[in-house]
Amino acid sequence: MAKNQTQDVDPYTAMESLREALSEAGIVFPSLSVDHSSPDLRLVELGRVRADVALRLAEALRGDREQ
């Protein structure tokens, strides 16, 4: 995504889209939220997750490549 496009992305929309995609993969990021401390940067806070959740995320991102 080009830099000028990243500035137009609503962080709430991005967060909910990510939450939905993670949920479809059976993954929950309990701390997923919009970072309100730097509104101009439009950051999404991923937060911390347990090691098993990080492993499931890595597997989901890899898809069938490593199976």
Image (spheres, helix red, strand yellow):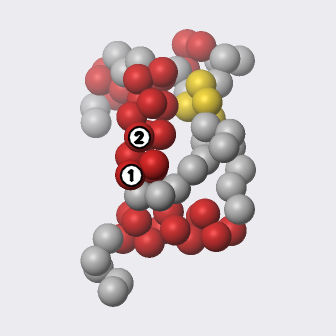
Q: Image quarter for residue 36?
A: top right
Whether tag 2 and tag 1 are in contact, CB under 8 A, the answer is yes
Q: Could you tell me how many numbered marks the image carries? A: 2
Relative depth, front residue between 23 and 64: 23
Residue 7, relative to residue 52: is it above or below?
above
Q: Is residue 57 left or right of residue 51?
A: left
Q: Residue farthest to the top?
A: 40
Q: Which numbered circle lies on residue 54?
A: none
Point out residue 20 in the picture as x, y percentages from the top left corner.
41, 40
Q: Which numbered circle lies on residue 24?
A: 1
Identify the residue shown where x is 40% and y is 65%.
60
Quadrant where the C terminus is found in the figure: bottom left
Q: Image quarter for residue 45?
A: top right
Quadrant where the N terminus is found in the figure: top left
Point out residue 14 in the picture as x, y percentages from the top left corner.
42, 29
Identify the residue shown where x is 56% and y is 31%.
44
Q: Amino acid at mark 1?
A: Glu
Judged from the image, the secondary structure of the residue bearing numbered disc 1 is helix
Relative depth, front residue between 3 and 63: 63
Judged from the image, the secondary structure of the residue bearing numbered disc 2 is helix
Q: Dot 1 surroundings within 10 Å: few (below 14), some, or many (20 or more)? A: few
Relative depth, front residue between 45 and 26: 26
Identify the residue shown where x is 61% and y is 37%.
32
Q: Dot 2 surroundings within 10 Å: few (below 14), some, or many (20 or more)? A: some
Identify the residue shown where x is 57% and y is 50%.
28
Q: CA distance from mark 2 to mark 1?
A: 6 Å
Q: Amino acid at mark 2?
A: Glu
Residue 30, relative to residue 56: is it above or below?
above
Q: Is residue 7 visible?
A: no
Q: Which numbered circle lies on residue 20?
A: 2
